[in-house]
Image: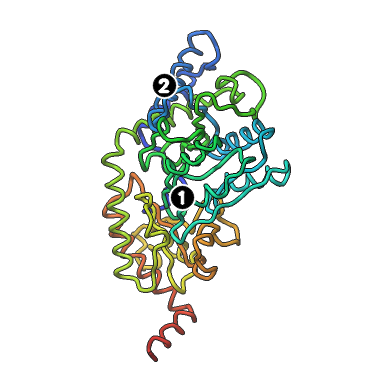
Amino acid sequence: MNYVYFDNNATTPVRPEVFEAMRPFLSPDGIYGNPSSLHSAGQKAHTALETAREQVAALLGAADPSEIVFTSCGTEADNMALIGAAFEHRAKGRHLITSAVEHHAVLHTLDYLAREHNFEVTELPVDGEGRIRPSDLAAALRPDTILVSLMTANNEIGTVQPIAELGAICREKKVLFHTDAVQAAGKMPLDLKNWPVEMAAISGHKIYGPKGIGALYLRRGVRLQALLHGGSHEKNRRAGTENVPGAVGLGVACDLARREMDAEVPRVRALRDRFERGVLSNVPGVSVNGGGALRLGNTSNLTFDCVEGESLVLALDQAGFALKRPDLPGVEISTGSACASGLLEPSHVLKAIGVSRERIHGSVRFSLGHFNTEADVDFALRVLPVAVDRLRQMSPLWEERGRRAANQ
């Protein structure tokens, strides 16, 4: 059974162009050399690795491909930046700043630094749309602040932060600035050459590349203490033989995203907006989380009153059966960050923007992508009202709400 896939912020399918580019590097009669080897097989791999580095740098707007360090994923890139910078510069201070809506790859890393290595972490609040106030950052900076980490765009509600303005505040105080750009890469223009950003993380599987590959942008001259020790790979910044097939896939995915951005970003935004308008028009008791802020054009986080989010996800996943039409596909969506799925704690992002615990449990994230079409949106708008209505019919809270409305 085919599915309409609306969970692209969790992961994306590999594009055919990416798969074909990787194929020669996974074949026994292809390009399999170690990129550190001097023989021709190794140099072919080295050339491919450097081409991928150039492609990643181009998407990020980096000044030089040498500023790109390949990692195993976005989480490693965040860890490398935060732990590496904290350890390298701890003689200058032990105060770190982040926000309440960061990905757990950042929050848990900073918690580790505080818990195990006596760093002090300040979490900046956000407004009701998930925006960080630059004035709050300026007020939180101290003489012993050595590092600030604030994401470019939020993975759950899509809110885009004023990174250039936030980075300028740090640059003025000579404080290192890191941004988790995992969700932003490929969905909005990035200009790391001109933005006051020292470090930025991205991940291949968020932009139609393979899993198991990511990259850290590390501005030239910024020093980190290495996390991995061994050979001199990645200019002594990350030991370990590079994942050449993964890097090639990431490079091609970045190149496709860069070349198609002017057309693809507005196309997906139009689909998202059409979906949101349809839901708000046809389903009562729905609100958009972060809807008043500048958002990624593919992300829609909706709260459905008197509906349990996990139940709605399952109902839509089984939508063909729920509608008595086994030939119809379901719709795959998410209740939030894939890395937090299975946790009983409510979304820390929705909590930070002031959504009540009860309403958080009725919130669902829809994230559209490259392979989605108008037909997908139309199908979702047929399935969703039916699924929500069916769940509400079983909800005593919805029944009580109806009685109160009738008595007014």
For badge 2, the amino acid type reads Thr
In the rendered structure, which disc, 2 or 1, sits on the residue that comes first in sequence? Answer: 2
Q: Nearer the viewer, residue 88 or 380?
A: 88
Whether residue 108 is visible: yes
Instruction: Name the outermost residue toward the top.
Output: 39
Would residue 372 appear left or right of 311 to someone viewing this image? left
**Residue drawn at (43%, 78%) of the image:** 393
Residue 36 in percent (x, y) is at 55, 15
Whether residue 2 is visible: no
**Residue drawn at (48%, 38%) of the image:** 203
For badge 1, the amino acid type reads Asn
- Total marks placed: 2
Q: Secondary structure at mark 1?
A: loop
Residue bearing mark 1: 154
Q: Is residue 327 above or below residue 19?
A: below
Residue 3 in percent (x, y) is at 38, 53
Rounded to the nearest angstrom, the CA distance separating label 2 from label 1 is 30 Å
Residue 330 in percent (x, y) is at 39, 58
Dot 2 alpha-carbon crowd within 10 angstroms: few under 14, some 14 to 19, many 20 or more: some
Q: Secondary structure at mark 2?
A: helix
Q: Please identify, in this view, whether the residue under mark 2 or under mark 1 is nearer the observer.
A: 1
**Residue drawn at (50%, 36%) of the image:** 171
Give the quadrant of the C terminus.
bottom left
Would residue 89 appear left or right of 273 to someone viewing this image? right
Residue bearing mark 2: 51
